[in-house]
Amino acid sequence: MAGRRERKVERSRVEVTVDEDRGVFMISVAAELAEMHPQTLRIYEARGLITPKRSPKNTRLYSQRDVERLKRIQHMTNEEGLNLAGVETVLEMEARVEQMRTELEAMRQRTRELEAQLNDEMARVHERLHTEIVPYGAYEPEPPTKIPVRRPDSR
């Protein structure tokens, strides 16, 4: 043992990231991660609550996002007392709200673009005319004041 040399081994750490939507877990692994039976995953798929990806050989492949959704479904059924019809309704409403948020943000962005165009156009007209621009209807005249008049009876 006198001739034994110690070698210093350098280890490097490799970090791997996987797209949350990429199907990487087979049904048994996804079921274990979500703490449920694989048959439950099949039931949820049949009801349209989850749609796993498929491999070229038609094997179900679940993503990290799928596993999180399964956990959420389980929470709604076990902790909040919803049945699967209630879970479907909640998930549909959440998807609709997310869609509306996306549409609203697109409308807000379009409004900002149009407002910038309007401001640019107003500045261009102001430069060309060398005068102030007053938006139509900005200064509406006040309605006339009615003063009651008493007239003597003329008989």
Image (tube, rainbow, N blue to C red):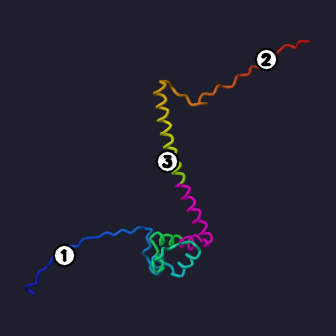
Image quarter where the C terminus lies is top right
Tag 2: amino acid: Val
Residue at which label 1 appears: 9
For mark 1, does the 10 Å Cα neighbourhood hold few (<14), some (14 to 19), or many (20 or more) residues?
Answer: few
Marked residue nearer the N-terminal end (2 or 3): 3
Q: Depth check: 110 or 85 in front?
A: 110
**In the drawing, does residue 8 fall left or right of residue 148?**
left
The part of the chain drawn in magenta is: 73-102
The mark closer to the camera, 1 or 2, is 1
Q: Position of residue 121 (x, y in %)?
A: 49, 34
Q: How dense is the environment of label 2, judged by Cα within 10 Å: few (below 14), some, or many (20 and up)?
A: few
Left or right of 16? Residue 154 is right
Check disc 2 and report the residue beneath it.
Answer: 149
Amino acid carrying label 3: it is: Gln
Based on the picture, tell me whether residue 75 belongs to the magenta stretch. Answer: yes
Label 2: element kind: loop
Which one is in front, 64 or 79? 64
Q: Is residue 154 left or right of residue 123?
A: right
